[in-house]
Amino acid sequence: MTRRRPDLGTLLTGERAAAGLVAAPERIVLTLVMLALSAGLWVSVGAHEPWTVLPTALIGVAVTWRLVPRPAAVAPAERTGAIAALSGAAVWAVANAVLSAEYLVVVRDPGFLTLSGLWLVDHPSTDIPSLGAVDAAAVDGTVLADASEAWNLRGDTVQPQGAKMLPAVIAVGGWIGGDRGVLVANVVIGAVGLLAVYALSRRMLGPLASLAPMAAVAVSVSHIGLSRSAYSEPLTLVTLLAATLWLWRGIADRRAALVALGAVTSGAIALIRIDGAAFALGLLATGVLALALGDGPRGRRARDALVLLVLQAAVLAGSYAALWRWSEAYAERLGDQAERIMLAYGGITLVLAAWVLSWLAGGDRIATRVRDRLGRRGAIGAGVAVMAVLAVLASRPLWWVSHRGTETSVDRFTNSVVEAFQASQGLEIDPTRTYAEHTVAWLSYYLTWPLVLLGILGFGLATAWTLRRRPEWALLLGAALPTSLLYFWNPEVVPDQLWAFRRFEPATLPGFAIAAAIAAWWLVARYARPRTEQRLRLVAAASFAVLPLTTWVSIKPGDTQPVAAAVPVFVREMGGARDQLADLCALAPGRPIILAGTSSHFGSLRVTCDEPTVLALAELAPAQVADMAAVWDVAPVVLTRNPEWFTWSADPVVVQHSTIDQASYDLQQIPRTYFTRTYDWYAGIVQADGTLEPVAPGGQAVVTSP
């Protein structure tokens, strides 16, 4: 029996499919970035609608699709690597979607970011009209039409805190899957982030070795926990790594379009985070350096450098303008920090622009002469210097204890929070400790020390290779090291985990994972015997998954809890919040809300119930309550956990009892425990005299006064 030879059409179809498969990881990253740029653009002009965002994203994908190359011939390793990366990211997304957070109560940033995303599902901007709440709040100084720092009044509208790209992107999930789609959307972003790690490291390591850093990030507790809740860091990771990849390919392949795409993408990071300029600046400086050290006509390299400078700066400026427009109080509150970053960015950009313009007269020779003068020994010395700086930062717990001041109200508040965390864990009470000397150690909580040390070696190698006529390697340094060094030195964050580590999620975590893989494969290639080289590579690859996996469980014999699991992996954060809010909104639908005493729920109720809401922070007299009710045509409902603050026409009863689970606030370790908040809610309809008519459990009826 003879085997039938496949015809030419079958062969070509199979080759095309294989080539498309190999290109798929980067094209999926491209699709998400185009969606993010489109959503960020339209939310910045107050026109975030399905008919604006989705067509613009499709146009962006169509225009840039061919910038992601399909290989002419596909090697088996390329096919295997792409299949493993795609299937791994898909499994990761499904597994984590099952336990996606219900972060609908504003305790920290994911609360208002999730609620902003829910609001954008049905509204074109994040400005929330007060609908009479301002007038109602005028009755007393303890009544507000906004709430603390997360919700800020601007004229007659309430502005949620923060940059708007992430809420705009997760709102697309709401167009597809309703409220559940919003809650799951950041998990999808986290999965695409894994493909971004793979696509970038594939450029450096090859199709199979690049699975190692992807696996390390995938099983890290930080990436899992920060993706399940609506933290902005996973989307920052995607855009940063995508920009790095496109700048790398644009410079190496001499394609101005890819340089332009990388410039726009890196500039748009400021639409995600207020410190976006710090991430963009690292890529800007190293991108210009790589072009100066590169081959090819001087005029073309100068043109590409100017494209990078102009486009990134323009997008960055527009991003900060949008932040000011849609979150004015937040921009003012962090104005000093943003001003320092922007001044540094502006100054360095001007210096780089002047240098690039001098290239036409031979100014780029400054870089090449320095490189040539350094030679091989100088390149190795530069790599050793980078490693030494990172090693010194890692050693700080041995010789330094960092403290913050007590001068500002922010410092005093942070000190009180740290003191409470120290007391709850039985640690030595030292409220002014920042724990900044442990920032490199924080990285070891999630990657483990062997991978951190390999990462330090990897950055040293990348530095040396940059100066040994492989200038594109500078982009790995520019993507990972500037913000890593900045936050290693001074993270400026409340130091509990996972909260504190979010500073290091976008650049440091993937950067160290990739650098560690570079170092591991270099060591094997350099020192392994031919007979054992393949086996050692397999051991190295397995270690990138196994070592971070060991952080999921801690074993401490003799401790009160000798075996403990990483809560962010095994527990749904804020589990129970969605049902609680649904019940509260169903108690008296269609009525304005007077929320008394629980400021964390102000935005939760305003967004999920979509009714005007005011926040009362203290006890109110019936006459004041009546004056507030007079603002609206419909009598408002009071929702409170403090029934003693009001006068009732009958004894109120609990109308909603619920619990919400939340990871503990742990210093110096991954959270291993969680706590459960218990809520007992009372509800009453405001009567003409300002007393409250109790609402029955379930909201089916109003209890009649005796």
Image (cartoon, grey):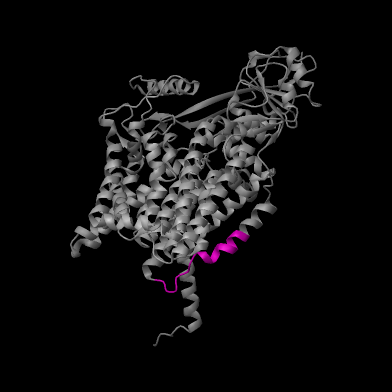
Q: Position of residue 626 (x, y in %)?
A: 77, 17
**Residue that extends furthest to the bottom in the rendered view of this protein:** 1
The residue range painted magenta reads 59-74
Q: Position of residue 150 (x, y in %)?
A: 58, 30
Q: Quadrant of the C terminus?
A: top right
Residue 538 seen by the camera: no
Using residue 283 as the reference point, say whether residue 639 is left or right of it: right
Q: Residue at x 43, y 47 (%)?
A: 282
Nearer to us in this view, 359 or 293: 359
Q: Residue at x 57, y 40 (%)?
A: 163
Nearer to us in this view, 178 or 308: 308
Q: Position of residue 347 (x, y in %)?
A: 48, 43
Q: Inspect the magenta stretch and tell me whether residue 67 lies in it.
A: yes
Residue 582 sits in which quadrant?
top right
Q: Inspect the magenta stretch and tell me whether residue 393 lies in it.
A: no
Q: Position of residue 260 (x, y in %)?
A: 52, 58
Q: Residue at x 58, y 53 (%)?
A: 35
Residue 208 sits in which quadrant?
bottom left
- Asked if residue 392 is positioned above or below residue 240 in the image, the reply reads above
Residue 343 seen by the camera: yes
- Asked if residue 646 is positioned above or below residue 120 in the image, the reply reads above
Nearer to us in this view, 434 or 559: 434
